[in-house]
Amino acid sequence: MQVPDQWWDRFDDVSGQYPDVAQTLQDSLVQWEQSVSGKLGEDDRPFLVGHPEFRYTQLPARDGIAHGNIERSNRFPNDSFFTNWSSKADRTGS
């Protein structure tokens, strides 16, 4: 199964049918981002993965985006893992 590059690629854009609702949502998003962004600040802490006492480390795949030959084990993101890692160029991320 090929997963879309972005989750929203699976949905139709209806903003043209509902321009007032789309504009209200867009304005609300901008207002929220402005109210939150000043409170967050920079976060340059490392994102540590794994532990020296454990042989394997599992990371949830539910929010990951597969690139290259990687595939999901099934179509349900909350109940899947990445498989078919066959190249050093294969990766996950945005």
Image (tube, rainbow, N blue to C red):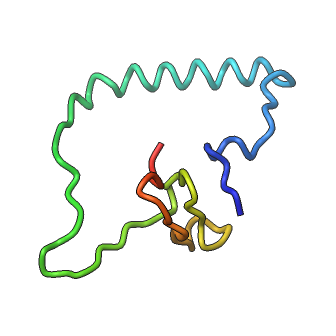
Instruction: Indicate the position of residue 22 as horizontal and vertical percent values.
Output: 71, 23
Dividing the picture into quadrants, the one containing residue 35 is top left
Residue at the extreme left: 52
**Picture residue at 67% right of the left edge, 42% below the top:** 8
**Picture residue at 28% right of the left edge, 78% below the top:** 56
**Picture residue at 61% right of the left edge, 21% below the top:** 26
Please state which of residues 40 and 50 is positioned toward the viewer in this rendering. 50
Instruction: Indicate the position of residue 65 as horizontal and vertical percent values.
Output: 53, 51
* Quarter of the picture holding the N terminus: bottom right
Using residue 85 as the reference point, say whether residue 20 is left or right of it.
right
Please state which of residues 42 and 57 is positioned toward the viewer in this rendering. 57
Judge whether 21 appears above or below 79 on screen: above
Residue at the extreme front: 87
Judge whether 51 appears above or below 5 on screen: below
Dividing the picture into quadrants, the one containing residue 27 is top right
Please state which of residues 12 and 54 is positioned toward the viewer in this rendering. 54
Instruction: Indicate the position of residue 76 as horizontal and vertical percent values.
Output: 64, 68
Using residue 35 as the reference point, say whether residue 92 is left or right of it.
right
Instruction: Indicate the position of residue 83 as horizontal and vertical percent values.
Output: 53, 70
Q: Number of labelled discs?
A: 0
**Picture residue at 35% right of the left edge, 73% below the top:** 58
